[in-house]
Image: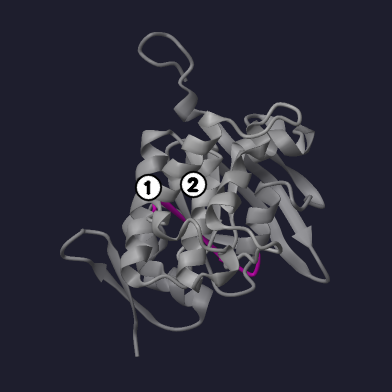
């Protein structure tokens, strides 16, 4: 697709693509997954435990290889990229990641800049500024001198997000990024991720069990069940009582949040 000046419109070109991806451990985990993910969109992955959400994220960052099908990054098979190139392009947030060394928060966040270094060069001014910015926007400056292993669960999640942001990637893959956070911080972090996704034309994909956070912030929702896609589209298209019941095995009510206008999901008891 071309823009008004006759130039290719990069926002319309998929940044990350899964083509008929299959993966199994001792049983099928992902079955015939096909997706096109674009710059500027925030995508939520939802589904019950064991539905394949985390496995899909690992495939999308080349930590696992599909047994069938392929993953494309900017139109090229993802396995053709070097680890350093992938680290520059994709930021990853694990749920409650454990740090194996006694690093301070500032040191840990600055590590994200290694992929931008030339050879064995030490971090430069640009790297330090990127780390400081990431600490500031995640509200983690106050404990930047503390050791990561001394933080609470919610504080640690903010620091892990800060580390991913410090790398200034084009893609953010986030596995339950708001786990262990107070509700106010959950909202603040997703609001921040959505703003940065828009402003910087990133692609952001996050796993969550919080259905109402997904409806409020995601542009698209992907609903997984037993490794298959039950629905993919706008929240109003995907989050129907019938689909949710098929995925989670209980009855749901879906109405409209009178303040935001987003779908509101409740369990029907």
Q: Quick check: marks 1 and 2 in contact, CB under 8 Å?
A: yes
From the image, give the main secondary structure of the stretch colored magenta. Answer: strand
**Label annotation for residue 194:** 1
User: Mark 2, residues whose alpha carbon is within 10 Å: few (<14), some, or many (≥20)?
Assistant: many
Quarter residue 55 falls in: bottom right
Total marks drawn?
2
Residue drawn at the location 38% of the way across and 52% of the way down: 234
Residue 51: x and y, percent?
A: 62, 69
**Disc 1 to disc 2, C-alpha distance:** 8 Å
Residue 222: x and y, percent?
A: 50, 57
Q: Which SS class for mark 1?
A: helix
Q: Nearer the viewer, residue 79 or 94?
A: 94
Residue drawn at the location 16% of the way across and 65% of the way down: 258
Q: Nearer the viewer, residue 210 or 236?
A: 210
Residue 38: x and y, percent?
A: 50, 37
Residue range highlighted in magenta = 218-227
């Amino acid at each position: 697709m071309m823009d008004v000046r006759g130039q290719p419109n990069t926002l319309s070109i998929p940044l990350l693509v899964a083509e008929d991806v299959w993966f199994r451990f001792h049983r099928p985990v992902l079955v015939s997954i096909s997706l096109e993910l674009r710059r500027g969109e925030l995508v939520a992955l939802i589904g019950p435990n064991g539905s394949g959400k985390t496995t899909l994220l690992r495939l999308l960052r080349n930590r696992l290889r599909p047994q069938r099908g392929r993953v494309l990054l900017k139109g090229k098979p993802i396995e053709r990229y070097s680890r350093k190139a992938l680290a520059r392009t994709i930021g990853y947030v694990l749920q409650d990641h454990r740090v194996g060394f006694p690093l301070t928060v500032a040191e840990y966040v600055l590590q994200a800049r290694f992929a931008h270094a030339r050879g064995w060069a030490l971090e430069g001014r640009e790297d330090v500024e990127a780390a400081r910015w990431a600490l500031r926007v995640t509200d983690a400056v106050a404990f930047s001198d503390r050791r990561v292993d001394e933080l609470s669960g919610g504080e640690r999640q903010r620091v892990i997000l800060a580390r991913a942001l410090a790398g200034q990637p084009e893609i953010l893959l986030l596995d339950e990024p708001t786990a262990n956070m107070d509700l106010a911080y959950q909202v603040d972090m997703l609001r921040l991720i959505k703003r940065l996704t828009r402003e910087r034309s990133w692609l952001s994909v996050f796993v969550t069990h919080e259905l109402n956070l997904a409806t409020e912030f995601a542009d698209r929702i992907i609903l997984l069940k037993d490794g298959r896609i039950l629905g993919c589209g706008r929240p109003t298209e995907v989050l129907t009582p019938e689909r949710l019941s098929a995925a989670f095995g209980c009855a749901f009510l879906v109405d409209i949040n009178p303040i935001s206008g987003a779908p509101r999901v409740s369990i029907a008891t």
